[in-house]
Image (spheres, rainbow, N blue to C red):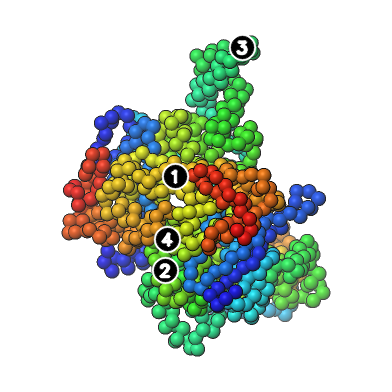
């Protein structure tokens, strides 16, 4: 075999993994849909300030004003308020702001909270999970018991108590969700590391004289972190759902805040008079969390059988 | 212990606790149950036995990868059985191990160059990065691979090549003693010969002492100067390899040798079948461990036999000196 | 070019001709079998030897119809007792696997169901297709009864049973309950025949309670249950200790003389082949390079690969340093042209990369695929 032939076989080999992944992706339209939705969400979030004036959600008065101005079909309530002349593709929210604009402004807020939550949970999970697994003994017991306590308490109770005690703000909201999310990641990372640390290359490193920090941080953690990353992608959607749930029941810092759960909250009161108030924000939550869930599932499917191979 | 012995174990034992059936009676799996031997500088000592005999546990115990339950290990004149931390790290530089499975021995996310540089970093072998790189380049060629292999990942290599990489990594710290735990058992026969030849060459070049652990009698014969046979945690025979293979004295060694198939039909003899399975190593009774499968056992074998030098430099753990053809037995006394 | 048929051509249990097989992978097409041919006679212990990746296991899977979905047979025939196995429909293949072909693998732990007792796993076999097994079970029990009856005073119960069984044999009809009883006694006697101590106890045990050697014997017993025409044994002793391996090999030889099953013994260990096989084929990179009777192959190896392989095997009985073969096994994604061994062959010349050499009889009953001998 000539050298050029050898190289092409080599590069074919290297590309084969990628090609396999892409093939699986293409094969599964549902996963593709998840990818498209997730990417669209992120793009929308990044462009939101360009599409809508970021300051437009502040208002002085909390006056009620509901409008629906869709030429396709009308809705009785429009006649009650001064809605004529303005275009509201998805109607207005309870305070007269364009619902479409509010939703567009809400996406980056929700997404940012979700990313902060997921990143923090991953960080906590990786550190404490791997320490618990690698050190074993008392440290493992302590971390496990603390994890169990947090898992035993119903999450919504925990979140409510935290927000009530610390006051309402985006920060406390984020904190509340982090508190309910981190135990799963600790558990997940712990089980990964427990398996990984028994592997032969770890024993070889010990034999060589490597200390535990080197083994843990340079070798074990990078090899164990994969399922955590997959899970975190999956969780972005679920976190958005969780945050929306909390604001939906009223734990929002500001009733005017464009946030998907908050917008849905307004919709309860006016469900029969202005159903779009709950339908569109709710639909948005559904689509975004579904998108990330499907994407996470797809990534897991793509890489799991490969590991089995 | 004189200047020619590099490692010596006395009564080395490793027992694993096994939870009893009920009422939490504690019994132990005696993987290594009192092994006394010494390894001479520059030699290749073979340690052979079947699965469960304790040879791998022995190898790991002397490397302090598992904590010995009893006995002592003296390496280069120093008792290393109870060392920890920095002092153990200092010793680790001089003794290295090559494992059986080349596919699992390497971190899949680490390039070959990093695998070779890491031990140098850990033990601060070199004073500059450039010097370390040069050493790595030198090593990779010594084990039969080439420079462009340094930037690749383990999965791009075959089993034999991966084993060469682990050998190079072991030599990076310039050890004096290497434990080879079934280094070729996972490899094809033709690759096996290449690796064994490489190991021999490296031994001469670097002045290494080897402990060669294997279940494969044929490989042991090719490679080892002296051979020790293990059964159920004890060393049952120790002799020069030629003597062991041509004139074994312990019934188990004899059974092992006659069970090995020969790739030569003209020299084929009916495979002698050693009946039964290896008994459990949990709660071993007071008699000779081989008694249940031994064709020559007597009442005296109800007592565990001592290690006796049956002829010069030929030790067995048996009450008798047996002639396998005539079945005649000569009783042995300690020191005879 | 297939191996020329022997004189008693009709006596072949298995005949493979020009079998070509490809795997479709994401890295490309792997040419796993490049036109192999061999034939196994009735009652013969045939060894298929080669290193990892040479295609010996794939050959066995092709015979048993157990290839993975990305495998494609691109040519050739596999004739088992007159039937072309490759042309069978899936249902017919399943029946063939049940009755005519038995396969034993390397690691019995993963091939035995850990949550079922040995007995229930053995009982599953006749239950899968009861009609096929009625004769075997009934004749076995009849033989047992005959042994008991011919001895002492005949027990009226046994005589009645014998009459009922004879009737069942004629009508090919057996009630479920009787079938289960017969199955159990047959299974236990099979466990006894593979030299398992206390077979009644083993019948009730779970796989994890047995050692590796014992599990492998159970696999052999399960294989023998259907009295197959062909037994495929793929590296069955590789995971076992050498003393246990000796026991299993001894057992295979005994069984072969008791039941006239042909065995295809696949292994990388030339020593095993020397100990138990009648004939042997050497495989390299998807080709069969040499076929001969065992004594002849070891006495007079012809193909350079066979010679290299024999020279590299370490010996426990001689103090000979093994030689090694230069280079390494080729990547079957793009194999060497012509004779696949030529890059590593010490005797290669200009003709070798041009085309694949045909299999010719360089000596009586000794076939080799190498230009050094013609072809």
Nearest to viewer (mark 2 / mark 3):
2
A208 relative to B12 in the view: left or right: left
Chain of the residue that carries numbered disc 3 in the rendered image: C
Q: Secondary structure at mark 3?
A: loop
A293 relative to C253 in the view: left or right: right
* Residue B303 shows up from this direction: yes
**Among the 4 quarters of the image, the one containing residue C162:** top right
Which mark is drawn over residue B222? 4
Residue corresponding to mark 2: B200
The quarter in which the N terminus of chain B is drawn is bottom right
Nearest to viewer (mark 3 / mark 4):
4
Which mark is drawn over residue A64? none
Q: Secondary structure at mark 1?
A: strand
User: Are discs 2 and 3 less than 8 Å apart at CB?
Assistant: no
In-front residue for pair C284/B194: B194
Q: Secondary structure at mark 2?
A: helix
Calculate the distance from the C-alpha at mark 1 to the C-alpha at mark 3.
46 Å
The quarter in which the C terminus of chain B is drawn is bottom right
* Residue B217 shows up from this direction: no
Are tags 1 and 3 found on a single chain?
A: yes
Are tags 1 and 2 found on a single chain?
A: no
Nearest to viewer (mark 1 / mark 3):
3
Are tags 2 and 4 found on a single chain?
A: yes
> x, y (%) of residue B277?
59, 45
Most distant residue in the bottom direction:
B127
Nearest to viewer (mark 4 / mark 1):
4
Local crowd size for mark 4, using a 10 Å CA cut-off: few (<14), some (14–19), many (≥20): many
In-front residue for pair B201/C347: B201
Local crowd size for mark 3, using a 10 Å CA cut-off: few (<14), some (14–19), many (≥20): few
Residue at 39% across / 75% down in the picture?
Answer: B142
Residue corresponding to mark 1: C234
Residue corresponding to mark 3: C154
């Amino acid at each position: 075999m000539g050298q050029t032939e050898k190289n092409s076989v080599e590069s074919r080999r290297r590309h084969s993994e990628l090609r396999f992944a892409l093939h699986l992706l293409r094969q599964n339209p549902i996963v593709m849909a998840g990818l498209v939705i997730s990417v669209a969400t992120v793009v929308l979030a990044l462009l939101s300030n360009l599409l809508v004036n970021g300051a437009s959600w502040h208002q002085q008065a909390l006056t009620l004003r509901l409008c629906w101005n869709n030429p396709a079909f009308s809705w009785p309530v429009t006649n009650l308020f001064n809605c004529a002349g303005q275009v509201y593709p998805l109607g207005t929210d309870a305070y007269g702001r364009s619902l479409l604009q509010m939703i567009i402004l809400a996406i980056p807020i929700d997404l940012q909270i979700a990313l902060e939550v997921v990143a923090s949970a991953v960080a906590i999970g990786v550190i404490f999970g791997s320490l618990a697994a690698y050190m074993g003994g008392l440290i493992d017991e302590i971390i496990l018991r603390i994890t169990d306590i947090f898992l035993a308490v119903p999450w919504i109770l925990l979140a409510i108590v935290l927000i009530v005690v610390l006051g309402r703000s985006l920060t406390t909201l984020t904190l509340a969700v982090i508190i309910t999310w981190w135990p799963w990641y600790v558990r997940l990372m712990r089980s990964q590391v427990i398996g990984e640390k028994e592997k032969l290359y770890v024993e070889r490193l010990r034999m060589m004289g490597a200390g535990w920090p080197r083994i843990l941080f340079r070798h074990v953690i990078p090899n164990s972190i994969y399922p955590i990353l997959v899970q975190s992608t999956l969780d972005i959607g679920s976190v958005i759902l969780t945050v929306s749930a909390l604001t939906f029941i009223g734990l929002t810092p500001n009733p005017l805040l464009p946030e998907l759960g908050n917008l849905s909250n307004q919709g309860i009161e006016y469900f029969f008079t202005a159903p779009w108030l709950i339908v569109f924000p709710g639909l948005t939550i559904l689509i975004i969390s579904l998108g990330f869930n499907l994407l996470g599932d797809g990534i897991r499917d793509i890489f799991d059988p490969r590991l089995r191979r | 212990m004189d200047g020619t012995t590099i490692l010596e174990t006395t009564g080395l034992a490793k027992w694993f606790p096994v939870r009893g059936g009920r009422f939490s009676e504690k019994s132990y799996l005696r993987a290594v149950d009192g092994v006394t031997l010494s390894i001479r500088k520059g030699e290749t000592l073979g340690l052979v036995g079947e699965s469960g005999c304790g040879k791998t546990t022995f190898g790991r115990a002397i490397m302090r990868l598992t904590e010995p339950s009893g006995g002592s290990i003296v390496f280069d004149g120093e008792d290393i059985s109870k060392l920890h931390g920095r002092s153990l790290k200092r010793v680790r530089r001089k003794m290295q191990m090559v494992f059986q499975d080349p596919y699992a021995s390497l971190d899949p996310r680490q390039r070959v160059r990093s695998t070779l540089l890491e031990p140098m970093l850990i033990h601060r072998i070199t004073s500059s990065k450039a010097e370390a790189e040069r050493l790595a380049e030198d090593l990779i060629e010594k084990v039969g691979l080439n420079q462009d292999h340094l930037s690749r990942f383990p999965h791009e290599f075959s089993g034999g090549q991966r084993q060469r990489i682990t050998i190079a990594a072991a030599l990076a710290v310039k050890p004096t003693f290497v434990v080879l735990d079934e280094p070729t058992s996972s490899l094809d026969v033709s690759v096996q010969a290449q690796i064994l030849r490489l190991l021999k060459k490296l031994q001469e070049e670097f002045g290494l002492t080897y402990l060669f652990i294997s279940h494969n009698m044929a490989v042991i014969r090719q490679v080892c100067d002296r051979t020790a046979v293990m059964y159920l945690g004890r060393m049952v025979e120790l002799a020069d390899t030629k003597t062991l293979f041509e004139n074994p004295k312990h019934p188990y060694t004899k059974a092992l040798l006659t069970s090995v198939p020969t790739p030569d039909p003209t020299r084929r003899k009916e495979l002698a079948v050693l009946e039964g399975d290896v008994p459990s190593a949990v709660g071993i009774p007071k008699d000779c461990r081989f008694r249940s499968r031994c064709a020559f056992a007597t009442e005296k074998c109800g007592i565990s036999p001592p290690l006796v030098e049956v002829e010069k430099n030929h030790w067995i753990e048996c009450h008798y000196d047996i002639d396998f053809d005539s079945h005649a037995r000569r009783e042995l006394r300690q020191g005879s | 070019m297939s191996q020329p048929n022997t004189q008693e051509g009709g006596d072949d249990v298995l005949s493979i001709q020009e079998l070509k097989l490809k795997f479709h992978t994401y890295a490309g097409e792997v040419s796993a079998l490049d036109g192999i041919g061999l034939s196994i006679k009735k009652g013969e212990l045939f060894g298929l030897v080669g290193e990892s990746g040479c295609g010996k296991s794939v050959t066995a899977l092709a015979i048993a119809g157990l290839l993975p979905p990305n495998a494609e047979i691109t040519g050739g025939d596999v004739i088992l007792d007159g039937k072309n196995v490759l042309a069978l429909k899936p249902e017919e293949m399943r029946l063939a696997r049940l009755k005519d072909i038995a396969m034993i693998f390397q690691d019995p732990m993963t091939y035995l169901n850990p949550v079922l007792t040995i007995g229930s796993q053995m009982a599953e076999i006749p239950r899968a297709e009861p009609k096929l097994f009625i004769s075997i079970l009934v004749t076995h029990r009849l033989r047992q009864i005959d042994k008991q009856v011919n001895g002492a005073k005949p027990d009226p119960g046994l005589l009645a049973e014998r009459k009922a069984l004879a009737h069942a044999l004629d009508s090919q009809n057996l009630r479920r309950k009787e079938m289960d009883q017969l199955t159990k006694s047959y299974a236990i006697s099979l466990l006894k025949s593979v030299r398992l101590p206390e077979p009644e106890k083993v019948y009730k045990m779970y796989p994890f309670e047995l050692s590796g050697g014992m599990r492998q014997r159970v696999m052999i017993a399960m294989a023998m249950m259907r009295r197959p025409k062909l037994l495929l044994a793929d590296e069955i002793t590789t995971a076992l200790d050498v003393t246990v391996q000796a026991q299993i090999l001894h057992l295979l030889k005994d069984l072969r003389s008791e039941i006239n099953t042909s065995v295809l013994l696949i292994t990388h260990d030339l020593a095993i082949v020397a100990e138990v096989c009648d004939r042997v084929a050497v495989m390299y990179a998807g080709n069969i390079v040499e076929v001969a009777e065992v004594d002849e192959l070891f006495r007079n190896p012809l193909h350079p690969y066979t010679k290299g392989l024999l020279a590299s095997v370490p010996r426990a009985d001689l103090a000979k340093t093994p030689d090694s073969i230069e280079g390494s096994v080729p990547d079957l994604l793009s194999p060497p042209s012509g004779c696949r061994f030529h890059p590593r062959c010490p005797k290669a010349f200009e003709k070798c990369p041009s085309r694949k050499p045909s299999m010719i009889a360089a000596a009586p009953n000794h076939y080799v695929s190498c230009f050094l001998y013609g072809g």
